[in-house]
Image: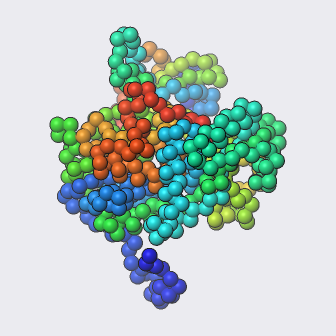
Amino acid sequence: MKSRYSIFSLLRNAASYHENWPEVWRSPEPKSSYDVVIVGAGGHGLATAYYLAKEHGITDVAVIERGWLGGGNTGRNTTIVRSNYLWDESAQLYEHALKLWEGLSAELNYNVMLSQRGVMNLAHNQHDLREISRRVNANRLNGVDSEFLDARQVKEFCPVIDLRAGGRYPVLGASLQRRGGTARHDAVAWGYARAADARGVDIIQECPVHGFDIEDGRIKAVETAKGRIEARKVGIAVAGHSSVLAAMAGFRLPVHSLPLQALVSEPVKPVIDCVVMSGAVHAYISQSDRGELVIGAGVDKYIGYGQRGSLPVTEETLAAVCELFPIFRRMRMMRSWGGIVDTCPDASPIISKTPVEGLYINGGWGTGGFKSTPGSGWVFAHTIARDEPHPLNAAYTLDRFTTGYLIDEHGAAAVAH
Amino acid sequence: MLLISCPYCGPREETEFSYGHEAHVERPKNPDKLSDQAWAEYLFMNDNTKGVLLERWVHSHGCRRWFNVARDTVSYQILAVYEMGAKPPRLKKQTYV
């Protein structure tokens, strides 16, 4: 593996005030036609392009992006990675993603800073305890590492937690996935972008899509701000804007786009070395390498494309965090932001062919898109290259809303929606 | 925080209300004869509009009555509030890329 950066290159570039570092990926003008065009240069889109090139030998690929690379939900999430989903279909998909995560830094020669520090999901009442035991057992049957902790073990694993949690939502136990943790979200986008670019993929930023050219039910071209781009196949991976792109292609999706918020505190010394989530009180928290507490809030209840959330949601989450962790009560929050998540009625994604031949969609990930980035790209690339889904994503069709084969993962999502 | 004008109680904060998604979705007239495809369209598919959306709200923590709202889903500006059963007002169509 070639090493790109060293103490020597750092010193050499310091002499020219760091103004002569080479570009990490090219920024070409789009060609007039490609084999495959991917809409959306977030983690999922870039991973798709990378695996198209690597696994399927398709390198005549463009990834087009209306804004800048990784500027949507890839750069807005709370960086948590885990695979403790309930149903067989989900466990296999997310576990496949987690296995790819585990080798990703080496694969891309780019440090994605995966830190498998353990993810705890708390139980606050008898029903939660039963539900969590069921989930732990289901995970283990599917080969996903998962264990049950009683209250004493929770306190041992995360000493700053207050088990009484204000008395109303006492912590009675938790499920723990030790292989879960966090990863550096921007690095994932940058790593995939560089690796895809090195294999010949064109990444074209600031290039919004205006429409699709569809003839006899088959995709012909994508109309963009930088002109018409012909393509044999087109993949859509645009998260919150999935419905907007689908409408351009003439079909509808079963998704609602909702603002999901997150916030970070001022940086402090290491105080919490795991990820703690509680679906019941709507809070999840971890600490970044810079020392900030990274806190995830819930979704707004109404459709919104504004990339900002409303204050009552923030207030509810911070109230829960303060009850669970009285030690954080005097901390100040530094920044808050929102991303638009496209949520499906069954809280599971759509990775599927569409009514338009040659047009594929990867969306509906809701609040769980980041953790699945490598796996999502991997199965989507397979779906596009072979024109049929991989067994791992065969259940995630658009058809399932007609057949009724829904994959209800509301319990696995950390955020109720 | 949205300030929503309930047609019966006047302006109140969004936390008093619950959301009912897209308005004017017609319930199938002949449910016994409906195909699975048509059921899916009715139950699950929606426009998820970026722009002006006609939607339903209910004043859960107030008068508990349903009503319709026309709201811009990008600026979050509320353009009109009208009663259930009323025709939607004529509004300028706002489009976003």
Q: Quadrant location of residue A328? A: bottom right
Residue drawn at x 49%, y 24% as measured from the top left: B56
Residue B62: tell me if it is visible.
yes
Where does residue B25 sit, x and y in percent of width and height? 40, 21
**Where does the N terminus of chain A fall, quadrant-wise?**
bottom left
Where does residue A405 sit, x and y in percent of width and height? 44, 29
Residue A280: tell me if it is visible.
no
Q: How is the image coloured?
A: rainbow
- In the rendered image, the vertical position of residue A358 relative to residue A332, given as above or below: above
Q: Quadrant location of residue A121? A: top right
Where does residue A335 sit, x and y in percent of width and height? 61, 56
Q: Nearer the viewer, residue B10 or A146?
A: A146
**Where does the C terminus of chain A fall, quadrant-wise?**
top right
Q: Nearer the viewer, residue A239 or A36?
A: A36
- In the rendered image, the vertical position of residue A89 relative to residue B69, given as above or below: below
Residue drawn at x 82%, y 38% as measured from the top left: A167
Residue drawn at x 59%, y 23% as measured from the top left: B59
- In the rendered image, the vertical position of residue B35 relative to residue A296, given as above or below: above
Residue drawn at x 40%, y 82% as measured from the top left: A20
**In the image: residue A157, left or right of residue B78:** right
Q: Nearer the viewer, residue B83 or B10?
A: B83
